[in-house]
Amino acid sequence: MRMIRPMLTAFAMIAFLGGCTTTTTTWVKTGSAAQAAKDLKACAKKGGVDFSEKGEKGGPVAFGFAGAFDDKCMTGKGYKKGK
């Protein structure tokens, strides 16, 4: 019985932290970078995730819980996922 509680606690923490991961997706569309940043900011706000003008690679980035960002917002604006 003493081993079950620590194991359940460890499992719960792993499951919780797994939901806190972030994902990075590059969105591609012909047009201006300024408009792309504006569109990403609008979709981030709609999806309830954070937005930053300067991400790790210097470009705009939306970040938050994995799965929270709705890809339909960006695809609806004519963007495609890049590699």
Image (tube, rainbow, N blue to C red):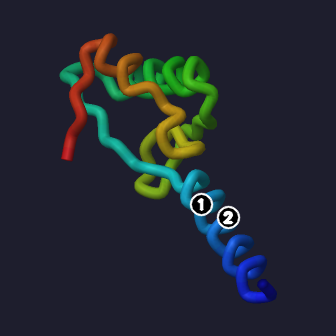
Please tell me which residue lies in front, 40 or 34.
Answer: 40
Percent of width and height locating residue 63:
55, 43
Q: Are marks 2 and 1 in contact (CB under 8 Å)?
A: yes
Percent of width and height locating residue 45:
60, 22
Specify the amino acid type for callout 2: Ala
- SS category of the residue bearing label 2: helix
Which numbered circle lies on residue 73? none
Tell me if 44 is positioned left or right of 75 in this view: right
Q: Residue furthest bottom?
A: 2
Q: Quadrant of residue 14?
A: bottom right
Percent of width and height locating residue 27:
29, 33
Question: In this picture, is 44 found above or below 54?
Answer: above
Q: Residue furthest front?
A: 1
Specify the amino acid type for callout 1: Ala
Per the image, the residue denoted by label 1 is 15
Tell me if 59 is positioned left or right of 25 in this view: right
Q: Quadrant of residue 47?
A: top right
Question: In this picture, is 10 found above or below 64?
Answer: below
Per the image, the residue denoted by label 2 is 12
Q: Residues within 10 Å of mark 1 (few under 14, many from 20)?
A: few
- What residue is rendered at 50% in x and 45% in y? 66
Please tell me which residue lies in front, 44 or 21.
Answer: 21
Q: Quadrant of residue 34?
A: top left
- SS category of the residue bearing label 1: helix
